[in-house]
Amino acid sequence: MALVWLFGPDLSRLAYWSDALHAAAHDAGIVPSSSLSANATVTADVCIYDLGPRRHADIGALLSAVEHHAGPRFVAMSARPDAEEGLALLRGGVRGYVNRMANARVLEAVVEDVVAGEIWAGREVTDHLLKLALSPSAAGPDGGEALLAQLTPREAEVALGVAAGHSNKVIASGHGVSERTVKAQLNSIFRKTGIRNRVQLALALSRNRPNPGRRLSNA
């Protein structure tokens, strides 16, 4: 059971989320925005923040709350999720980015995942991350060498495959190994780098695009 605080201007929407989370055995309550002030004490495990019913909402207050409160995990609920807004929030420390009209089952899954340390991002954000990871224009001065240098050549190949949007099955087939082997290598990548899931891996490689000329051995 998680303690969930709900914030936002639409009380009917907040009440719907509160009821859904109570039905899933979480302790949820609607809380005034002043509870996220810089000097406030936030005891919630998860803070669900409604950006409101209009597109292109002001995300400054949410990012400020994330900056001042390191304990809870923040989830942003957006009227029309898009890659630009989602990436800005994720890079600002928000752990979940969801359509505010998502149903109760999705909301329950989001809370469970972020409590477990995962990042939840919508398809719009995930697709954009994968495009960035594949785009040569995303390359930084040192590419993704710092991240890949922590990995074995095989692990680096798996990381690039995941960032390109390939499933474990496709990666395994391409390298002539079993899916179990790919899964083990992926777990090793997460352990070495501190990255928790595929979305985080895509995000990391989108910021640190590896040198496309780098050759990886088959060892």
Image (cartoon, rainbow, N blue to C red):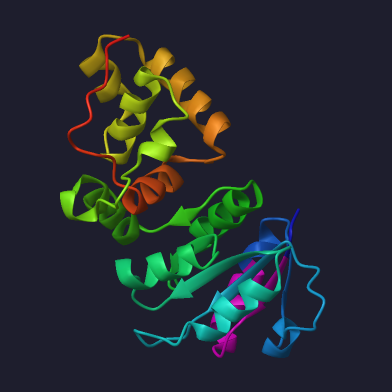
Residue 31 horizontal/vertical position (percent): 72, 83
Q: Is residue 18 magenta?
A: yes
Q: Judge whether 148 appears above or below 41 on screen.
A: above
In which image quadrant can residue 174 be found?
A: top left
Q: Judge whether 70 appears above or below 68 on screen.
A: above
Residue, x 35% and y 53% (percent of image)? Answer: 207
Residue, x 45% and y 65% (percent of image)? Answer: 98
Name the residue nearer the viewer: 49 or 154. Answer: 154
In the image, farthest residue toward the front: 141
User: Image quadrant for the C terminus?
Assistant: top left
> Which residues fall within the magenta stretch?
4-19
Residue, x 24% and y 39% (percent of image)? Answer: 211
Name the residue nearer the viewer: 145 or 138. Answer: 145
Residue 16 horizontal/vertical position (percent): 58, 75
Residue 185 horizontal/vertical position (percent): 45, 20
Residue, x 41% and y 86% (percent of image)? Answer: 57
